[in-house]
Amino acid sequence: MRVQLFGTCMIDTFFPETGMSVMKLLRHFGVDVSYPKGQTCCGKPANSGGYARESRKAAEQFISVFEGSKDPIVTPSGSCASMVKNHYHHLFKDNTMMRDKALAVADRTYELTQFLVHELKVHEAGLSGKGKITYHASCQLTRELGVKEEPLLLLQSLNGAEFIPMPYADRCCGFGGVFMAKMPEISTALADEKLDTVLSTGADTVTGCDHGCLMNIADAVRRRGARIAVKHIATVLAEGLK
Amino acid sequence: MTSTATSIPFRANAAEALSNSPLRAAMRNATETFAKKRTEATASLPIEEWRTQASDTRLRVLENLGEYVDRFSANAVRAGAKVYRADNAESAVSIVGSILKDRAVQKVVKSKSMVTEEIHLNKYLETLGFKIVETDLGEYIIQIAGEGPSHIIVPAIHKDRKQVGRLFSEKLGCEYTEDPAALTKIAKKILRDEFLSAKAAISGANFAVADSGSLVIFTNEGNGRMCTTLPPLHIAVLSIEKMIPSLADLPKFMRLLPRSATGQMLTTYMSVITGTRKAGESTGAEELHIVLVDNGRTKIVAGEYREMLKCIRCGACLNACPVYRLVGGHAYGATYPGPMGIVLTTLLEGMEKAHPLLDATTLCGACGDVCPVKVPLPELLHKLREERVERGFTPYLERQGMVGFGFAAESPQLFSLGQTVARVFWPLAKKIPGLGALERMPIPAQITFGRSI
Amino acid sequence: MTREELVNLFIENASKVSAETVRVTTDAELNGALTAILADTKSVFCQQDTAKEKSVVIPPDKRIDDYTGASVCIEEVAGAIAETGSLVCSSQGGKPIQAGLLPGHHVAIVSAENIYEKLDEYFGALGDSPPTNITLETGPSRTADIELTLTIGVHGPGRLTVIVY
């Protein structure tokens, strides 16, 4: 099986090691992963800020990079996947040709855990893990994509690790893209509350499917000097590969 | 309301609210309790089906709102009411004022109504010399405190029992107590005398039934019933979008409104009031005046934000909102807070005044999930953000930054250059005012993922 | 659903919203259910208009004609809704339905044959010219306006007794 990986600008810029985990994971399950050149950002930050013109530019770039193939497009981010799947076609409501292209790439796009569970059955592979793990359910992943069970199935399947559910797991962490910059007081307060619930689980690792949230939670951890690892789910899973 | 040049200082209000720890504790308690009760009350019920049906009914009304309003008016008149149309807040308050002046009434008992907050009715009537007595306990508390509501269902939720106790002993001259039951008893006693002596009442309405001309009022305390059955004069003030087609449609909303608001199966009282007291009856006002307030709604219903007017004011989106939970209703500086409030305030009061409220959301989508009539709040919030950008209400630096983002997003070379520049200048950039958020992000990697594979 | 099942469903749901419920089938049982209530109170308002109201025996010294000053209101209400445990109070036929609101204790007699299973059944049949005031009463008056602490008996009655007859 072949897939095209959309790495996301955040992983590309800040967290290349998470990208490597994604590659490792997919390849381990026999997937031929390509990383199409020319990919930039899905446009989510501009889109959530209300900048339709700029997000359209990003969407056009994404479409031009990915449209030449019929392979699934996999991305390790709920919010980027949702941007492509749920928002692109709205950006081209006055342009039938582009809208059709947007719908075509949307159709091929999977958030990582969706792909791992539904296409690769990774949750049945008996991967190993360690320690106590809790999970933050990010907003677009949960509510826009409806991906609720997949990450849980994966985490619960890890041999040797204990999965501890977090209270209010799907409550916003306060990242919100531009929100983080424009409303720092509320953003940090929400991150602090999120960290409270994270720590209430007694876990040694908190994971999730979106680096935006994880970065925001990691910042709360840093500010508080808490002792808990913050890892993308791809990293957690890749660590359990033999 | 006419918009003023000053915009609502949401960020400053929010910062103040965040440093108020009793407020935060009260808000957390209220929103979490309500959200939990709502979840329990809607579990194992065909709630999705109900939401769809209720949404369809509300949308059907909005698509022909003028017709429903006309039908309601005709039927209410047939049942003995007088019906007035007020295009704006000024005209609405003056209609109410002149009804009261003509009857030489001194005092008015009032049952909770958000639209009367929107049109600032109390303030207007007080300047005319009337005594207005709010009779919902929460409204009564904030009235004697001289404040506005912080939640559309529990208006005084920002006050804890100690604050209410101090307020009562100071303003009502009673002995200090912080026991909610004792405080309730004190208010009940005062308000009972007001009810029995009042010659006029003002209420809102949760729904207006077009086919019968009925008003529908939900309350738990019984104050709505007192207001609408004891004084001989009843003035109902409601906004035009409250219409539902017929009484047969009412059960769908009876199932959804209390469950979404407080998690109750039904509120203690729900009254359907149709016109005035008729021959042989011993209940009902002798005079019923219904003031239908437009205040910009005809314009909203004709535009792309129409679905906002499906809202039935249950408050579920407030309780679900992470931002509202932290800062409470007053930070929004407007009548309606929370997600529905951001949208409605922007539509009613204008972008110029309300645009800072559009930052009071993380677009997390929780509000859309709980709305009993499926108002697409996340979509409407997003649409308004787009409108804000189009109309130039975002800061200059942000706009320039986004232009830069657009160029980089469509050019991989420029994007890559941007990443390099960001890495090099990161330590410096953190110190630029407005870029403080960079402090909370890691330093860009030496080698990007794209280049490392 | 049989009549008796409907009665039981109504009683079950009315109990859930803190109403005290009694099932009676004779005038003697009705007065039996009222004995303690009448003994404890000073003033009772009862219009004694319907047949069932007429069979209520009230000591003359406790009877009061002004409901605003009464401690207890005994009345037969128009009906009830089983699914929500609600009483249907209607102004039809000259009932002062505020009489059930002002006294601290509302004693409502519900005729078993006037119980509807669903809200839709009742409201669907109401038509376009209902009586001036129809009020559904579901449990005693309540508020949670101070710190969400539930307090029973604000403006309306703090005690609600439902007698299904």
Image: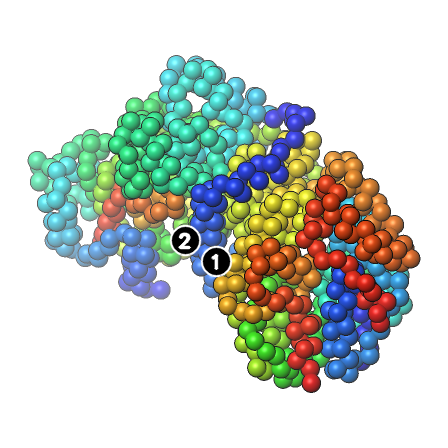
- Same chain, labels 1 and 2: yes
Q: Residue at x 73, y 69 (%)?
A: A18
Residue C66 position in % (x across, y down): 20, 30
**On screen, residue B114 above or below B82:** below
Mark 1 highlights which residue? B39
Residue under circle 2? B265
Q: Amino acid at mark 1?
A: Thr
> Given contact means CB atoms under 8 Å apart, are the residues at marks 1 and 2 in contact?
no
Q: Nearer the viewer, mark 1 or mark 2?
A: 1
Q: Is residue C6 left or right of residue B51?
A: left
Q: Quadrant of residue B221?
A: top left
Q: In the picture, which quadrant includes the N terminus of chain C?
A: bottom left
Residue appearing at x 77%, y 83% in the figure: A30
Considering the image in quadrants, where does the C terminus of chain C appear?
bottom left
Label 2: chain letter: B
Label 2 SS: loop
Q: Position of residue B240 (x, y in %)?
A: 56, 34
Decide: is A5 above or below B63. Answer: below
Circle 2: is it few (<14), some (14-19), or many (20+) Cα within 10 Å? many
Q: Is residue B278 above or below residue A30?
A: above
| Residue C52 falls left or right of residue B63 | left
Front position in the image: A188 or B261: A188
Q: Chain of mark 1?
A: B
> Residue C68 versus residue B178: which sits nearer the camera?
B178
Secondary structure at badge 1 equals helix
x and y, in percent, of residue B47 in the image:
52, 58
Vertical order, C88 against A241 (above or below): above
Using the image as rendered, state which of residue B207 and residue A80 is in the foreground: A80
Which residue appears at 32% of the width and 56% of the height? C16
